[in-house]
Amino acid sequence: MHSRTSDRPEGAQLSESARDGLKIVIVGGFGVGKTTMVRSVSEIRPLSTEETMTQAGVGIDDASQVQDKTTTTVAFDFGRISLDEQMVLYLFGAPGQERFWFLWDRLFMGTLGAVVLVDTNRLSDSWYAIDRLEHHGTPFIVARNNFGEPKHTLEEVRAALDLPADIPIVDCDARERDSSKAVLVALARHLYSLSTSPSTFSSAPSSAAQESTA
Amino acid sequence: MIRGAVDSEDPDRLYTVTGGRSRVDESVFDMVTLIVSESEPSPGMQSEHAKILRMCHRPLAVVEISSYLGLPVSVVKILLCDLLDTGKITARHPQVVRSDRQLPEPEMLKKVLVALQNL
Ligand SMILES: Nc1nc2c(ncn2[C@@H]2O[C@H](COP(=O)(O)OP(=O)(O)OP(=O)(O)O)[C@@H](O)[C@H]2O)c(=O)[nH]1
Ligand SMILES: [Mg+2]
């Protein structure tokens, strides 16, 4: 763990021709492997930083709070993958705390999509993330991070999460580069297929059903 | 993991760095806007400005600059506005973005998919 700051970028530098930054977010409960996944696929060591966000105090923690401006500091980590000479994909490990989801829209504006990492021993940790993604209309896939031998089939996990049939669910080991890469490929394939069938996407499958719990 | 100095940030330092400004048109810079220096630091320049110019010889995202400087993204955006206004940097804004429920063009997403498959 380094604590110093440096004004020299470490590791691989981007190509001179890099011009298009893309964003994908990895979400999920505490300790589910978000940072591990960023680390395994990133071409740089994961970096961390913060954003300070101000919003009207419409009760981040408590609905009875005074109607005042509230400043929330959100910490997150991220990594980077150069896709080609122009495109650079940034992967963000989103903070797990539920209260940050109020800031989700602004913090990760323009994000292509999300990976919801789940640990099947703590499935309920991911309900909130899935609910918010559906609420915001952010396309996503679910990846089960296998801490040891899986005890359930993916279809059982799908049923437990009440996940619509058109949302992909895949297995992974977040520590393995190839496995994490396969998760990103699955997300990219899902995004591509959504983009070629606009009606599926604009109708935001199942969000109405989930809205009642929001 | 490289942990920036953000945690222990002294509010006075943030004030000094930004000259007390707190407003910036945030829509100018995205977290993944790529910044490129267009000039060398000049003598007497504010040290954070000079650091940014030195680190952006090659393109670097706003969020990476933030991490290396140990300053919140919003503060870095203010510093970048100064440099952009005076022509000391150029900014390459993201092209492949999703807005509300509108995905980027299929051709772009196909390129992303193929690039990931070929990694
Ligand atoms: N056995 C096993 N351990 C894993 C796997 N993925 C992550 N871990 C471990 O689980 C712990 C938590 O992983 P992190 O990547 O820090 O999880 P995180 O989601 O970033 O955690 P927070 O940011 O605190 O919410 C670490 O000790 C990892 O080494 C996995 O696939 N298998
Ligand atoms: Mg983490």
Image (cartoon, coloured by chain):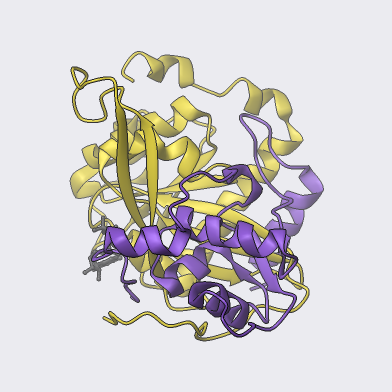
Chain colours: A yellow, B purple
A113 or A50, which is in the foreground? A50
Quadrant showing the C terminus of chain B = bottom right
Confirm whether residue A16 shows in the render.
yes
Residue A133's place in the image compared with A38, above or below, is above
| Residue A15 placement, left or right of A163 | right
Closest to the observer, A16 or A172: A16
Position of residue B19 measured from the top left corner of the image (x, y, whole percent): 46, 58
Tell me what residue is drawn at x 62 percent, y 43 percent. Answer: B27
- Ligand 2 falls in which quarter? bottom left
Residue at image position (52%, 74%) is B46
Height in image: A174 above or below A205?
A: below
Quadrant the N terminus of chain B occupies: bottom left
Name the foreground residue: A72 vs A11: A72
**Residue sitting at x 24%, y 62%:** A147
Q: Position of residue A5 (x, y in %)?
A: 37, 79
Q: Dividing the picture into quarters, in which one does residue A22 lie?
A: bottom right
Residue A87 placed where, x, y %? 71, 64
From the viewer's perspective, is A9 left or right of A130? right
Above/below status of A98 relative to B115: above
Residue B105 lies, with reference to residue A34, above or below; the image says above
